[in-house]
Image: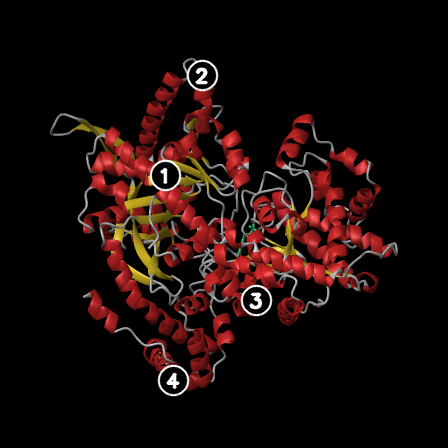
Amino acid sequence: MSTDVMHIGPGNSVAELKESILGHFCFDVGKSPEYATLHDWYMAVAYSVRERMMEHWVSSLERIRDKHQKIVGYLSAEFLMGPHLGNAIINLGIEQQIKEAAEQLNINLDEILQQEEEPGLGNGGLGRLAACYLDSLTTLKVPAIGYGIRYEFGIFDQMIRDGWQVEITDKWLRNGNPWEIVKPELNYGVKLGGKTQGYTDEKGGYRVKWIPEYEIRGVAYDTPVPGYKNETINLLRLWKSEATESFDFQAFDKGDYYGAVHEKVFSETISKVLYPNDVSEAGKKLRLSQQYFFVSCSLQDALRILELRGLSLDDLPDAVTFQLNDTHPSIAIAELMRLLVDEYMVDWDKAWECTRKTFAYTNHTLLPEALEKWSLPLFAHILPRHLEIIYEINSRFLSDIRNKYPGDDDRIRRMSIIDEQGSKYVRMAHLATIGSHAVNGVSALHTELLKQDVLHDFYELQPDAFFNVTNGVTPRRWIKLYNPRLASLISDRIGERWITHLETDLINLQSFADDLSFQQAWRDVKKQNKTDLAHLLKQRFGMNINPDSLFDIQVKRIHEYKRQHLNALHIIHLYNRIKQKRTDGITPRTFIFGGKAAPAYYLAKLIIKLINAIGETIDNDPEVNQFIRVVFFPDFNVKNGAHVYKAADLSEQISTAGKEASGTGNMKFSMNGALTIGTYDGANIEIMECVGEDNFFLFGLDAAEVKAIKQNGYHPYDVYNNNNDLKEVIDLIQSGAFSKGDTNIFKPLINSLLGDDPYLVLQDYQAYVDCQQRVSAAYNNEQAWTKMSILNVARMGKFSSDRSIRDYCENIWHVTPG
Ligand SMILES: *Cc1c(COP(=O)(O)O)cnc(C)c1O
């Protein structure tokens, strides 16, 4: 069968592609080309490209049926895939042919690519990491399935009105989605609510049965994930919730049509919308239902695949490994126990051994507000059986701890899955840690802090279970696809192997760092990328920025810990200097910001307003805007990121030390030739170690100093009073200079900076301003700057997600890449 399928595959010549596009136009779009819209062309091209993945898809499915291969199940509540078409074209290696086919059809490929609505099924870094990992898993030929939720509405679209963020519903499916294939036959029931009941089985054993209040259904929607020129496809399998029956016929018979439809509406609510909070937990009922919903479908699916391969439950840990992308899917541990113990009648100890061998957990944050916990009553209401199972897991675990540390009641309290202080909670990070054979942090520093701090007791108990896997990003999307000029320049000098061998090959660029003609070509690329971004901002938003100025960029979710407001304070410092005619040493700069704030995060939204207010004030002041400009690029997402990372001279990575677990934006910027101004935090540290201290602008407190200041008492008001320059900056905001005289609007922000600011913004202010002065000076030496930029790129090989995935394969999954 599979060999026959290979032969029906379509060809990749220009003529064949052209014919295929026209064919899809007729048969799938259903129009004559003379009435075509750009979107119609996009659909026809997308179907043609998808068709070219299908033959590999089918043979890749065969591999999933191969019982000797371990499959990686990557469980993640978010996948921020970005647009598919451009990526599929480069990974299939048909960009030249598609371009020519499009030309012959008189359509502009760039315009076609612009038509794709990005599937925004993630908030930021965590969801994007999952997407980079799928790309690398497939490129490394590791059989994998990404399991998640097919949200009907992804992360909101951001608009800026009067300087404020406005959220617009993300209707990404409105024009259809040519990349997914619904598999109606792959559907599973998911129970919710109700109660449990004990009973005695035939052998006289005590068993428990879950009598749910209702049941919904999850249906699989599959999206092919192509590897880079390797004829391998993996699967992104997202679950959509549906009603078990579309009508409750009993209610319908009694004439309660409304009641019957109501249940259908409720069932469909589960996968309706992505929660828009990055690194913070709302503790909402629907969110827990979402998590359980996708996890339950995914585990049932994995057990079906196990059976399909002719394997038994004993084989599970050798057949599948589940990676938990943060605690969001960690209910999977209790769910697998429930399936094994209640439904497959496996005895507890055996089930537990199997479960622990099957799961591994990635922690993504140390922020206390991000550590997921569910109130006990809420948990009991939705998942009564799982709560019992968690109690049993906890009681066995704590009895081991008691044996190991007799009399240490405080340790018991600290390690328990149940937080018993005040109102009770289920701590998901504890469940994830106890139920996994491996726990990993996402950068060297983050892993160290996990061991010392948040999971210290668990580390003491099982030091060998802790690993570091520093995050990475895929060079296919983030260099080759989104920075084609740089990619060609690199390939011209060192060949093309870097695209899949970043760690070994990119370093070969080093020998060109002093080559003056190479330097010139390097600068030309950057200049063209900056000019493109300037045009785009002009065309879309009427903004005016100068590509000859230094592009100083901070794009990422807006959060106090990321400290966009520290960046803003530096801008106001420059503003003051310009107004006071102290302009020597000021290098012309364009400050570019982008990022979404969680809709309920008031201070983050106020930071957006402040940035826009400063930008507007400067726009209207020619004395200032001959030196500096500030723009806020609305709706930062993967698609917009395509234009941003490659255009940066300077990358802002200025989080409070100890708060950014890794960051991946830092990697994208540096790989694309930006230098970093950054704190000693997350992966910044490793980036600096790789590129060299001389090629990195480090400033500010380190994590130990942050901790010490907090312990000794942080007094920002003293910092403010003792620094005239800082005082002028804060006072200028207070005075209403950026808010048309309104002295109230930014008060909450000022109060936070001068009050109990956990992110120590003012403490790092002077170090940051001084460091920015060094940046300005360095930028004025064109040749030296270019050399630093080349060295940055050459030494970033470690930060390919291929390396991260190899680390997972070797240390955690025990899988050999194909
Ligand atoms: C890479 C990326 C992020 C993560 O950025 P950080 O700077 O690491 O916070 C967030 N959003 C999008 C759209 C990204 O592409």
Q: CA distance from mark 3 to mark 1?
A: 44 Å
Name the quadrant containing residue 135.
bottom left
Residue ID for mark 4: 32
Q: CA distance from mark 1 to mark 4?
A: 50 Å
Which numbered disc, 2 or 1, marks the residue closer to the eye?
2
Q: CA distance from mark 3 to mark 4?
A: 39 Å
Residue ID for mark 2: 409
Secondary structure of the residue carrying tag 1 is: helix
Above or below, 173 relative to 77: below
Q: Amino acid at mark 4?
A: Ser
Residue 630 seen from this side:
no
Which numbered disc, 1 or 4, marks the residue closer to the eye?
1
Q: Amino acid at mark 1?
A: Ile
Q: CA distance from mark 2 to mark 3?
A: 59 Å
Q: Residue at x 35, y 52 (%)?
A: 817
Secondary structure of the residue carrying tag 4 is: loop
Q: Which mark is residue 486?
A: 3
Which numbered disc, 2 or 4, marks the residue closer to the eye?
2
Residues marked 2 and 3 touching at CB (< 8 Å): no
Q: Residue at x 63, y 41 (%)?
A: 656
Task: Find the residue positioned furthest to the front.
Answer: 511
Q: Nearer the viewer, residue 515 or 334?
A: 515
Residue 580 seen from this side:
yes
Name the quadrant containing residue 712.
top right
Quadrant of image for the N terminus: bottom left
Q: CA distance from mark 2 to mark 4?
A: 76 Å
First in residue order: circle 3 vs circle 4 = 4
Q: Residue at x 24, y 46 (%)?
A: 303
Residues marked 3 and 4 touching at CB (< 8 Å): no
The local crowd at label 4, few if under 14, some if 14 to 19, many if 20 or more residues have their Cα within 10 Å, is few
